[in-house]
Image: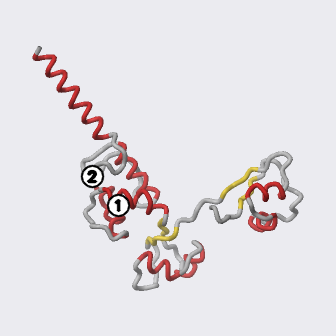
Amino acid sequence: MRLRVIAFLVLCVLALGQLAFTQEPGQRVLKPGCWGEDVFWCQRKLMDMGLLEQATGRYDNATQRAIKEVQKAHGLPVDGLTGPLTFKVLDIGFEAFQYYTVRNGDSLYGIAKKFDTSMDELVNLNSLTDTNLRVGQRLKVPRVSEPVIYIVKPGDSLHTIARKFGVTVGEIVKLNSIKDPTLIKPGQELSMPKTCDQ
């Protein structure tokens, strides 16, 4: 009888432990020593932001440092713990920006142009007090969405493709530097211009 009770208690503890580590992101406060799927999710988001190199599922010092950087950037209390507010920023905020490392010859104007933004926006996003950049400096820049690539199918023409994506033939020709619009062939990859929906 005693053995059955002990076995039952062990099973209960294991079941509760399993529940604790398979919770959806945001259902518990993550701190050093935590591990599980929610930690892995958090680390993947930090990797997307360019703040972490790998996702291990364990909340280590590197994860804590990255979380502090996110908290500081979004005006949250900088405690290195991932609670509801930090989860919200990770879930929504990471879409808004990415990181760019300054290279030799870069200027604020050139970087702004490259990421289709303004110098003022970069200054505000990074709380810059000086517009002189140094090689290796990391700057937050607006996240650039990946271009939509269309693979030409047999029977396609630029007119049918343009109609399908709600753009003009001229926009496709210009974006892909097509010299002769009649010479597209199956298997060819074409970048699609952005529309208001993208």
Going 49% across and 61% down the picture, which residue do you hit?
95
Q: Amino acid at mark 2?
A: Val
In-front residue for pair 133/68 = 68
In-front residue for pair 121/133 = 121
Q: CA distance from mark 2 to mark 1?
A: 16 Å
> Which quadrant of the rendered structure holds the N terminus?
top left
Going 59% across and 74% down the picture, which residue do you hit?
116
> Which quadrant of the rendered structure holds the C terminus?
bottom right
Going 78% across and 59% down the picture, which residue do you hit?
162
Kindly identify which residue carries mark 2: 29
Residue 23: % across, % down: 33, 42
Disc 2, disc 1: CB below 8 Å?
no
Q: Is residue 46 above or below residue 56?
A: below
The label on residue 66 is: 1
Q: Is residue 24 above or below residue 63?
A: above
Going 72% across and 53% down the picture, which residue do you hit?
150
State how many labels appear. Answer: 2
Give the residue furthest to the top. 1
> In terms of image quadrants, where is residue 22?
top left
